[in-house]
Amino acid sequence: AGENGRSDYGNGVARGSIAPPANDDRHASAKSQASHRSDEEDGHAGKHDNFHENGHHGNQEDGDQYMQHMLDKSEADRLDQDRSFVKPDDQNGTNFSHGVEEFYPNVEADTEVMATINQEGLVQVDETGGIQAFVAETIAIEGDDVGIIKSDAEIEKEEKKKYTKYFLGTVACLIVVIAAIVVPLTLKFAKGNQVNQLNIITEEPTSSPSLMPSAMPSSMPSSVRFTRVVQKLTPLSGNALKVQGSPQYRAAMWISDEDEMQMPLSMPGFEQRYIMALFYFAMDGPLWVNSNGWLGPESECFWFGIDGVSEGCGGENTGGCKPRGDFVGDYDKVCRIGMGYANNLYGEFPKEMGFLTEMTYVEIQGDWLHGTLPPEMGEWRKLRAFLVNNNFIGGTFPPTFGENKMLGTIFLNNNRFNGTFPQVFSTLKNLEWLEADNNTFTGEIPESICNLKSLRIFTANNNTLNGYIPDNWDENNLIEDFELEDNNIRGPLPETLANAKFLKDLRLSNNQITGSFPISYYDFESLEELYLDRNKMGGELPQTAELFYDGLQELVVYNNAFEGRFPVEHFESTLRVKKLMLHDNQMTGVISDNICDRLDPERSYTRLTDLTVDCDLISCTCCTCYEDGVLVS
């Protein structure tokens, strides 16, 4: 029985080793596994042979039992492996259609497993019932592919790993996409909201790493020189230097990195050059009509508008600067800014301009200046002329100018100045010419204005002034032109104004002035233009030959309540009269032919341009006629 069992088992192994399936390539791995198993089982058979050959005693029954035990163990291992065997696609062998007992009568088989094997044809056998080949439980062959067959637990574990990788990859992709969208939008909106944002510039790097980081990083990389420039100019311009895009910031950037001169920070005049660059940026310099030389490599003393001579400032070799003195640390100092008329300046005066203490002349007319005048301008103690008419400057005139002892000319007309008429004007002892027309000044003209012994021209037409005309003029006044038209001035004409022996032009039109023409005014020998129209005056004009008739060229008194005879004879003897506007009054009389002849267009210097009367009260053949204040012919 033992021999038969060993022989059958050995035959099965031998057949499996030399009779593989027809397709050698598809089952190469299976053949290798079967050969390995055959060698292993031959080893078991060898052990059995050695058991007898070594002379161990035992009966035949013991040998049979040992052989049966070995067969049972081998068959049980085979059946466990066959349970995971996958049926090949190419089935050229014989299906496992016989009962297992027919081939292995001494093996107790698992009936359920054998039924499954028999039904599905998972094992190929030959005609004698021997198994053709042992197939490894972890090998599957399909075509040219060889794969490992894994248990359900292993497959499930790998599936979980695969889906985990997919999930983590998807999450990572989403994070990248979100970052790609959100970060640019955040930067865009952050940039749009930082028009005038305070960008703090970090301190200059220390020689060794600091223990603590700076309070806030700078908004953009800055050079060491720029950082030093900001530190040097901070006492002058403050935090405006750190506001990106401000005129101060741009001027500091220019003098730090772009100025071809690259002036050392310790060099005298560094602040002055910065201030002139600041003026350029604050006044929209790139759009000026004429900006010759500005931000060029030459000294700022030779830039357009600075270069020149005026009010004792400037010279051939110093441009528009006062030449330096002999003491150490001095430099050529800017003393004038004369940008001409309508040069397209647009902006506000920077307060840093007050640092230019040698300033004597400022002229910026017919441009787009706005804002207010900074009080720091009061530091211009040597200023002699300040001409900023025809702009859009508001606020009041800084009282800090009161310490100036040299300011002689001020043009503020055609701006937007407001508030009470500045008292500071009365303190400018050297003031000669003040024009403040077409603003919105309020209040009264201070009496102290009469104390300005150098004042020659005073005009404040078209404001909202009220009160009385100052009446404290003495014989030492030099007033030549006094104008307060289109205000709300009330009261009579001031008697003391008759002391103004140089008065040439008196214009008080469109106010609330009352009373009659003062007799003291009869001695105005220099008076050329007298405008009293649109008031509430009455009485008669002087009937006798008075001095003021000799030089009078324009007499405009319409829309009042003057009465009596008009003294036409006092105008026939002069050829200088240009205007006689007498209508809308109660005066009577006759206009002579001699006066009418002066309306001849062929006349030039002696031509009479305007002659208006109430034709129902004054007889005239050449006049422009009114009746009850209405033009009729």
Image (cartoon, rainbow, N blue to C red):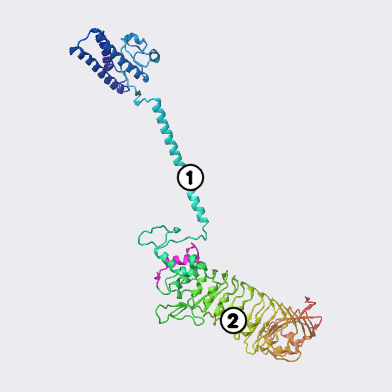
Quadrant of res 592:
bottom right
Decide: few, some or many residues near mark 2? Use Cα within 10 Å; few <14, some 14-19, many ≥20.
Answer: some
Residue at image position (43%, 61%) is 202
Give the number of marks.
2
Q: Position of residue 271 (x, y in %)?
A: 45, 72
Q: Is residue 76 above or below residue 339?
A: above
Q: Nearer the viewer, residue 60 or 231?
A: 60
Q: Nearer the viewer, residue 125 or 314?
A: 125
| Left or right of residue 18, residue 556 in this image | right
Decide: few, some or many residues near mark 1? Use Cα within 10 Å; few <14, some 14-19, many ≥20.
Answer: few
Residue 417 belongs to the span the image colors magenta: no
Q: Is residue 137 above or below residue 588?
A: above
Q: Position of residue 305 (x, y in %)?
A: 50, 75
Distance from label 1 to label 2 (Cα)? 69 Å
Residue at image position (67%, 90%) is 525
Mark 2 = which residue?
427
Residue 246 belongs to the span the image colors magenta: yes
Which one is in front in this view, the residue at disc 1 or the one at disc 2? 2
Mark 1 = which residue?
178
Q: Earlier in the sequence, mark 1 or mark 2?
A: 1
Q: Amino acid at mark 2?
A: Thr
SS assignment at label 1: helix
**Magenta-colored span:** 242-266
Q: Quadrant of the N terminus?
A: top left
Q: Nearer the viewer, residue 125 or 583?
A: 125
